Amino acid sequence: GAGVSQSPSNKVTEKGKDVELRCDPISGHTALYWYRQSLGQGLEFLIYFQGNSAPDKSGLPSDRFSAERTGESVSTLTIQRTQQEDSAVYLCASSFEGGRRDTQYFGPGTRLTVL
Amino acid sequence: AQSVAQPEDQVNVAEGNPLTVKCTYSVSGNPYLFWYVQYPNRGLQFLLKYITGDNLVKGSYGFEAEFNKSQTSFHLKKPSALVSDSALYFCAVRDRGSGNTGKLIFGQGTTLQVKP
């Protein structure tokens, strides 16, 4: 596919369960970002991967959140012991090389609902 | 710290009329500014960006934005609105305070409602 893809599109889970969200970036894009969109907080940055560099984790809200990326391909965002305040849309974006001039292209998002 | 403000939660315009969605920013140094649009239950779609050069930037779907350094604004405009332009619009600035991560800082979003 030509764009960023994310799965699942919707996820409903119970409080305390762990969830994994997946992102497939655009082929050839070396930079990958995770953002979270919620009613109360708007759009906020979570984590950034660029090639083999150490990821920028400065936006992760707690140690329950973690993310991995295999090379320059798929990334998974894991939320452990989910809480109701984790309910949000999780957006993934990729860009060619991650520089400030780069355009980030977003996937359709995963809507997470924690009951 | 970098920040972006979209002063209007909602903008209403009649189809065929010009539209403006406002955005102001606060950055240190040269700003890199972006506009994205989000349709219901969809991700963000890139519209246009200002990096350097001409203050008037043209983008997708007939949209344009004018960079005004003295007023620290980057308003989104379109000469003739379509009902299909109805969506949520986000202005964003590229963060310059964290090395070269390039993460975006978003405004709170403006809902554009175009009525027939």
Image (cartoon, coloured by chain):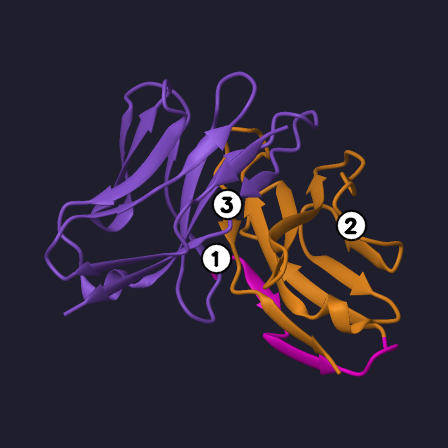
Q: Nearer the viewer, residue A35 or A1?
A: A35
Q: Amino acid at mark 3?
A: Gly
The residue to which callout 1 is attached is A3
C-alpha separation, residue under disc 3 versus residue under disc 1: 24 Å
Q: Is residue A15 magenta?
A: yes
Q: Chain of mark 2?
A: A
> Residue A36: horizontal and vertical position, in percent?
64, 57
**Residue plotted at (58% across, 34% down):** A97
Which hue belongs to chain B? Answer: purple
Q: How many marks?
A: 3
Residue B111 visible in the current orientation: yes
For the residues marked 1 and 2, what is the alpha-carbon distance in whole angstroms?
25 Å
Please give the residue where the numbered disc 2 appears in the rendered image: A60
Q: Colour of chain A?
A: orange
Residue A100 % position (x, y): 55, 29
Q: Residue at x 57, y 29 (%)?
A: A99
Q: Are marks 1 and 2 on the same chain?
A: yes
Q: What's under tag 2, amino acid-wise?
A: Leu
Provide the residue designation for mark 3. Answer: B107
Q: Nearer the viewer, residue B108 or B30?
A: B108
For residue A88, which quarter of the picture?
bottom right
Q: Residues within 10 Å of mark 2 (few under 14, many from 20)?
A: some
